[in-house]
Amino acid sequence: MLASVSEYFDLNKLMGMLPNRSVHGKEIDYMLNFCHWFMLILFVGWTSYFIFCMFRFRASRNPKADHKGMRSHFSTHLEASVVIIEAVILLGFGIPLWGKRVNEIPDQQKNDALKIRAIGFQFGWQIHYAGPDGVFGRQHVRFIVPGLNPLGLDPNDPNGKDDVVSLSDMHLVAGRPTVVRVSSLDVIHGFALHQMRVQTDAIPGAEAPMWFRPTPDIGEWQIICAQLCGDGHSGMAASYRTETQKDFDEWYAGQREITQNKLKSQAEAMKKAEEAEAAAEAKEAHGEKKAEH
């Protein structure tokens, strides 16, 4: 009944909220709509009371101040009612919804969840997919090569052979649970997917998980940086889309080939550098031995 009333008298649409595209988003929209109506009633009520007081206690009618004040307990009861309603909204709606988002995180093996890492930087997002095995490849700062391997994936780690890295372009499977672990390479960013009704801060040195399940709808939207992160904040454009499993698999296969080719070329370059270094060391050792004789 609450849902039907909320849909019929929907203030969210009048306030310009973007359409919901997540399974859990309806609960959030119902709560927001209820809060909007509650705040509207409070606004109208307190404004009407303010105007009434201005008229009722105008100077021409009350030239002398009454120092005894309010004799009725109506205002006390009204304020207590407002506090109780706000507590119901927080304890009955807000905290349970928040609990689902932080406690009931699906697992890839049990729930077929798509595992993604979103790493913010000035000014874009590196999107890292764990692949079918659900395990992210090992990373280290010594493997970072701008433009080639920005996240420092170990080219020789077998867990990273099915990983994919995409620049500011996130693909999701419609109807499939998705877990995104959000972090940052430099300053604090905000990772906001408004259509999915989820948002969290991207903090350097920390990783915050967020999860959602897209509806079966197909579409493409923007990833919004919800924190002022520098001069280029307004141009921190990124996109995400929901698509069928078939389309996602096709995209993933092509992106995986690109990512793995980059890692392969880096591994070959590292191997050549190690061989050259070993040859130089052997030559130097041979020269020292020859000098001793």
Image (cartoon, rainbow, N blue to C red):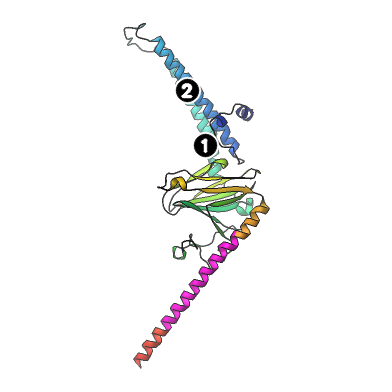
Q: Position of residue 83 (x, y in %)?
A: 47, 26
Say whether residue 157 is visible: no
Q: Quick one: label 1, few (<14), some, or many (20+) residues within 10 Å?
A: few
Residue positioned most to the right: 246
Provide the residue designation for mark 1: 95
Which quadrant of the view contains residue 218? top right
At a point 52% along the width and 37% down the height, the residue shown is: 95
Q: Nearer the viewer, residue 151 or 108?
A: 151
Residue 112: assigned label: none
Q: Position of residue 92 (x, y in %)?
A: 54, 32
Q: Is residue 140 above or below residue 234?
A: below
Q: Is residue 278 above or below residue 290?
A: above
Viewport quadrant of the C terminus:
bottom left
Identify the amino acid type marked 2.
Phe
Q: Nearer the viewer, mark 1 or mark 2?
A: 2
Tell whether label 2 touches label 1 (CB within 8 Å). no
Say whether residue 86 is visible: yes
Kindly report the secondary structure that dominates the magenta region of the rendered protein. helix
Identify the amino acid type marked 1.
Ile
Q: Position of residue 255 (x, y in %)?
A: 59, 59
Residue 43: assigned label: 2
Magenta span includes 262:
yes
Q: Secondary structure at mark 2?
A: helix
Magenta span includes 173:
no
Q: Secondary structure at mark 1?
A: helix
At a point 51% along the width and 22% down the height, the residue shown is: 41
At a point 60% along the width and 29% down the height, the residue shown is: 6
Q: Which residues are magenta?
A: 255-282
